[in-house]
């Protein structure tokens, strides 16, 4: 049986805590797709947090 890498997607609703990403590692998720946006607009604030955590 083949195994595939596990990938997570980070959206505006994804928790931005370090613990969240550590929990993903426990579930063998080693790659996360994060929107890299540093516009400064309020509606994109969460994307900025994920960018900094990454």
Image (tube, rainbow, N blue to C red):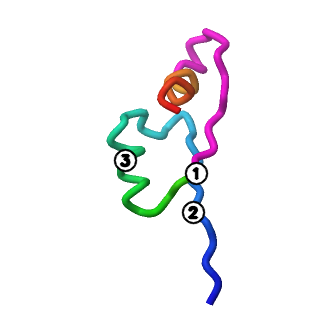
* Residue designated by label 3: 22
Q: Secondary structure at mark 1?
A: strand
Total marks shown come to 3
Q: Secondary structure at mark 3?
A: helix
* Up-down relation of residue 17 to residue 21 (above or below): above
What's the CA distance linking mark 3 and mark 2?
Answer: 14 Å
Which residue occupies 47% across, 40% down? 14
* Residue designated by label 2: 6
Q: Which residue is situated farthest in the top direction here?
A: 40
**N-terminal label among 1 and 3:** 3
- Quadrant of image for the N terminus: bottom right
Q: Are circles 1 and 2 on residues that touch, CB within 8 Å? A: yes
Q: Secondary structure at mark 2?
A: strand
Q: Are circles 1 and 3 on residues that touch, CB within 8 Å? A: no
Residue 39 lies within the magenta run: yes
What's the CA distance linking mark 1 and mark 2?
Answer: 7 Å
Q: Which residues are magenta?
A: 32-45
**N-terminal label among 3 and 2:** 2
Q: Position of residue 52 (x, y in %)?
A: 52, 23
Q: Quadrant of residue 5?
A: bottom right
Picture disc at residue 31: 1
Q: Position of residue 32 (x, y in %)?
A: 58, 47
Q: Quadrant of residue 41?
A: top right
Q: Which residue is situated farthest in the bottom direction here?
A: 1
Q: Position of residue 42 (x, y in %)?
A: 56, 13
- Give the crowd class for mark 1: few <14, some 14-19, many >=20 residues within 10 Å: few
* Up-down relation of residue 42 to residue 50 (above or below): above
What's the CA distance linking mark 1 and mark 3?
Answer: 12 Å
Which residue occupies 54% across, 34% down? 12
């Amino acid at each position: 049986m083949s195994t595939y890498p596990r990938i997570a997607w980070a959206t505006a609703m994804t928790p931005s805590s370090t613990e969240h990403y550590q929990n993903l590692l426990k579930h063998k998720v080693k790659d996360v797709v994060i929107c890299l946006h540093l516009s400064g607009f309020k509606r994109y604030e969460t994307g900025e947090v994920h960018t900094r955590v990454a």
